Image (cartoon, helix red, strand yellow):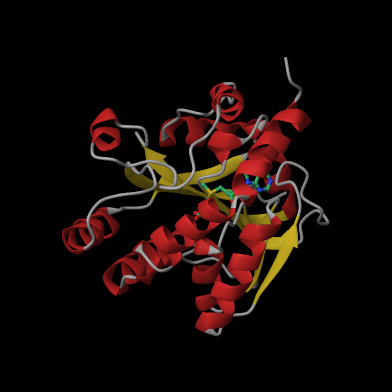
Amino acid sequence: MKNADELKQIFREGWRNADVVAHRVERFIDGEFGFEPSRRAWLEALSQATHKCDIRRALDMGTGPGTIAQIWAELGYETTGVDFSSTMLSAAQQAATRRGLSIELIEADAEYPPFEPESFDLVSSRALLFTLPHPGYAIARWTKLLRPGGILVLIGENSPTDPERIKRGFRPAPNWTPDDEYRSALHQMPLREHTDSFVRVLMEAVGIEEIRNIPMQSVIAARVEHDALDPPYGVLQGTPYIVAGRRAED
Ligand SMILES: C[S@@+](CC[C@H](N)C(=O)[O-])C[C@H]1O[C@@H](n2cnc3c(N)ncnc32)[C@H](O)[C@@H]1O
């Protein structure tokens, strides 16, 4: 039985793979988030998540190529992205430069974020929880990084491994197949399969208040529009969710 560090090492190797990184950039930076109607829809949905909150510093955990970090930077927040894959971070830097955005990128384990308590107004994460050995500790630590009243925004997909989509050819990356060791490590992850309701419960458990789901109709409609142009292939995707809540005031 491998320990958490050994499991993370297996994932880290996978996320460092050049094909995986290139595919993530293609599907999300240049793909969904590069498609103007989708980008506008995500921007609007994420703005709703931070509505009525005074935000200066934002932190995106497991930022990958900077998919969500770019949106925070576009909204004018001083943004930091964390990832444990150096190759993802290089892609994030290149993608930010191409868009003229400034994002601080830090290589670190999202389960042990190297920041002072209460140093951010906003902490987000998209599509990371499923690959963490200890997502509960991670969310508790992210919450401590928020100032009281700061916003936690957790983003993911319900039913990402929908068998119908897998049949249509959705897979992690066309030139990369997870080996048995990787698959076995992934199956040991407690949130490998989860829904937004699990995420809400974890947020409640760490003292997040005013938890709400952001309406996603416009993001879904833009995906349908994009899918009609772009033959469906690539990263597993289900029905997107954004759950946002506020760290309790002391
Ligand atoms: C599915 S991708 C999501 C990337 C990005 N958030 C997005 O929405 O496009 C997961 C990312 O989390 C990173 N990751 C996985 N486990 C991590 C950990 N323990 N610490 C830091 N980053 C991690 C991977 O390197 C990868 O870039």
Q: Nearer the viewer, residue 48 or 126?
A: 126
| Residue 167 percent location from the top left of the image | 25, 33
Q: Nearer the viewer, residue 168 or 138?
A: 168
- Residue at image x 18%, y 62%? 225
Task: Residue 59: tell me if it is visible.
Answer: no
Total numbered circles: 0
Q: Nearer the viewer, residue 217 or 126?
A: 126
The residue at the far front in this view is 175
Work out whether 201 lies above or below 243. above
User: Seen in the image, is 130 located left or right of residue 120?
Assistant: left
Where residue 101 sits, quadrant-wise, is bottom right
Task: Residue 207: tell me if it is visible.
Answer: yes
Where residue 197 sits, quadrant-wise, is top left
Q: Nearer the viewer, residue 140 or 37?
A: 37
| Residue 1 percent location from the top left of the image | 72, 14
- Residue at image x 49%, y 43%? 176
| Residue 5 percent location from the top left of the image | 77, 32
- Residue at image x 73%, y 53%? 145
Work out whether 47 lies above or below 249. below
The residue at the far bottom in this view is 100
Work out whether 46 lies above or below 234. below
| Residue 247 percent location from the top left of the image | 63, 49
